[in-house]
Amino acid sequence: MLNPVLSNVQIQIGDNFFPEHIAKKYDDFLYARNYPLKTMRACLHETIQNFTMPGINLNTFTVEGLNNQRNANRVDFPHPVTQRIYPGHEPYESLLSDMSITITFKNNILNWLYCFEWIYKYYKRTREAFEFDVNVTMLDSAEIPILRFKLSDCYESSTPELEFSYTESFLTSRTFDMTFTFNKFDVTMLIPEFNMEVLRF
């Protein structure tokens, strides 16, 4: 891989993010220019720098004024009531810290241009791009898959500004962050012979 920092993680963006009517001209350009990566799919995947997955926050509520008389026989008994914190009852989607992921790409102009065109055609009145899946597979040191996140019904929700600068060093590595919003979040344990149900959010 061109990206050894993430060699223990595999990110696969679904086919719907690379429809032929959008990706073909980029593929033809890469092939004609004899780039080491011949398709836009490969170019995007191999230039991923890092990504951020949402965490899980359990919402809670506090009940006050609960009876504390079971301790009434203690000499140092301070008060007759107490309080307790319970888990909330919100839907699973509310437990996630965010319903989006952020992927950082190298600032290859083709990367930015492709993402810009995709989001433009997704929001056109006559939609020409559609929702897709994103699979994130975690590997152990022996490159054995142990955990997979499947984000479904995704779409690109943020394209950053294209920044130019004449003052920075030529060797400065430039990146940009893309935000993908999802509507379904599944977690699958892939540890060999580790039998566990799929966690669905």
Image: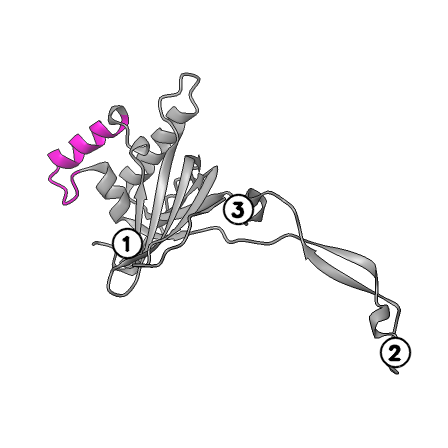
Residue at the image position 75 percent from the left and 56 percent from the top? 62
Question: Which quadrant would residue 114 be assigned to in this image?
Answer: top left
Residue 73: assigned label? 2
Magenta segment range? 22-38
Residue 98: assigned label? 3
Residue at the image position 31 percent from the left and 59 percent from the top? 193
Colour option used? one colour
Mark 3 is on which residue type? Answer: Asp
Mark 2 is on which residue type? Answer: Asn
Q: Is residue 112 magenta?
A: no
Categorize mark 1 by other alpha carbons within 10 Å: few (<14), some (14-19), many (20+): few
Say if 19 sits above or below 191 in the image: above
Residue at the image position 36 percent from the left and 26 percent from the top? 129
Q: Main secondary structure of the magenta part?
A: helix
Categorize mark 2 by other alpha carbons within 10 Å: few (<14), some (14-19), many (20+): few
Of residue 181 and residue 173, the one placed in the foreground of this image is 181
Residue at label 1? 170
Labels 1 and 2: the sequence-earlier one: 2
Q: CA distance from mark 3 to mark 1?
A: 35 Å
Q: Secondary structure at mark 2?
A: loop
Mark 1 is on which residue type? Answer: Phe
Q: Secondary structure at mark 1?
A: loop
Q: Is residue 31 magenta?
A: yes
Q: CA distance from mark 2 to mark 3?
A: 48 Å
Q: Quadrant of the N terminus?
A: bottom left
